[in-house]
Amino acid sequence: MRLILMLLIPLFLTSVALAQESADVPTESERSTTGGATTLEDILARQRGEKVDNRYRSDNTGQGNAEGLLGQLGTRGVASDSDVYRAIRYGSADTTVSSKGPAAGVLIQDGGMWWLNFRTGPLREYGTYILGGMAAIIVLFFLIRGKIRIDGEKTGRTVTRFNGFERFGHWLFAGSFLVLGLTGLLTLYGRDFLIPLFGKEGFATIAQGCKWLHNNLAWAFMLGLIIVTVNWIAHNIPNRVDLKWLAAGGGLFTKGSHPPARKFNAGQKVIFWACILLGVSISLSGLSLLFPFELPMFAKTFSVANSTGIPQMFGLNLPTQMSPQEEMQYAQVWHVMIAYVFIAIIIAHIYLGSVGMEGAFDAMGTGEVEEQWAREHHSLWLEEVQEKGASKAAASPAE
Amino acid sequence: MKAFLAAVAVMVVITVAAPYALQQVGFSAAEAGTGSAVRLD
């Protein structure tokens, strides 16, 4: 009996709480008691961070736009100030302004607070976890596996791995990415960490410099992206060899394990495609930010996404009507989300291409790699190169 | 090393040239964000 009571009491309390919660959401009849205006429950719900249905305001903007706005400078007539402001806020007012640009006609835009809170809150918080997580994984990997050495005896002979133009494209892409990443992170975190160090005026100069560099260096990044894609896309088409490489974990976790690979192994192909896809995405959102309000993409993208029904499966209904400013806010948020993932992947790439693996940096440094390194990490590619070399020598014998 | 230095040189040239090029083709912030009614020049 005591057990049954113990079960029933929480159930009863929960139902009371639920009843209380449901009572907090005002019904249409309750709202009519305030003349259709905002109720105390609306305000409390908003303060609790709950989503409040705003239709009672957005659908109530006077008897029409014309009536709402005609009397702005004269008597109110049938319209009130509230009607006018609601019409302006919810975008149903037919406003005329002397400034150019699609955003100039939006006089009130309340999506900015959501964006600001998200940008300084969850976006930065989870982004920091991504970067910190990747750094922790690399430190752990280094402690367990150590530096990946060339197992066999070095031959003293080298093989040309990347020609000058391939390396130029890589460094253009990589160099600009590093500067863009650094200036982007300074823009995102700088207000909190640099103002205490340099003061507000000092930070203003740094922030302005970061913005100028970020905006103008972006073109070098996009050029690098194009060169890298053209140079290497044919070598990065997945094939059966990649499955063997992946099954062996790329030999990364076992000393002496060297699964066969062509010019690029499966791990490098993953990095390549991540760079291309993330690079294109970050470039498009970046262009949208470089030319404010000229390249809106999110309302259209969300519309296509909603039509697939996938967002709804996760309880999302992505907005398809948004002001020009909201388009910019989504572009900025997306740009940063992609950047975090991109930076995390590149941290891993930099580690393995430098201190993590003996002989790897030479591929991008001088372009020449130790033959034994090539045999261990790209055996099939080395065979191809040596066969080509042998056939060339046979075709043009020394005189 | 030459490839790296060439890439850095191109980065510098592009970064300096980009704002001038954009201004020439009418994509400066002043051009994109204001109308003749509110321009001071």
Image: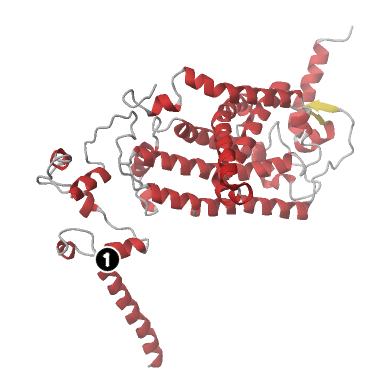
Q: For this rendering, which residue is in front, A73 or A350?
A: A73
Q: Residue furthest top?
A: A399
Q: Quadrant of the N terminus of chain B?
A: top right
> Mark 1 highlights which residue?
A41
From this view, report whether residue A332 is shown above or below residue A213: below
- Please report the residue visible at 51 percent of the width from the left and 45 percent of the height from the top: A337
The answer to which image quadrant residue A21 occupies is bottom left
Question: Which chain is home to disc 1?
Answer: A
Q: Residue at 44% across / 33% down in the picture?
A: A288
Report which quarter residue A65 is drawn in: top left
Q: At which x and y percent is residue A263?
A: 70, 31
Q: Position of residue A95 (x, y in %)?
A: 23, 36
Tell me if I can see residue A166 in this picture. Answer: no
Element assignment for label 1: helix
| Camera-side residue of A103 and A2 | A103
The image's colouring method is secondary structure
Quarter that holds the C terminus of chain B: top left
Residue A26 horizontal side relative to residue A281, left or right: left
Name the side, left or right, on which A23 lies relative to A325: left
> Residue lying farthest left?
A77
Residue A396: x and y in percent read 82, 10
Whether residue A210 is visible: yes
In the rendered view, does A320 fall on the left or right side of A383? Answer: left
Neighbour tally class for label 1: few under 14, some 14-19, many 20 plus, Cα within 10 Å: some
Q: Amino acid at mark 1?
A: Glu
Q: Which x, y percent locates residue A351?
A: 72, 43
A162 or A24, nearer to the observer: A24
Along the line of sight, the residue nearer the viewer: A181 or A299: A181
Please state the total of marks drawn on the protein image: 1
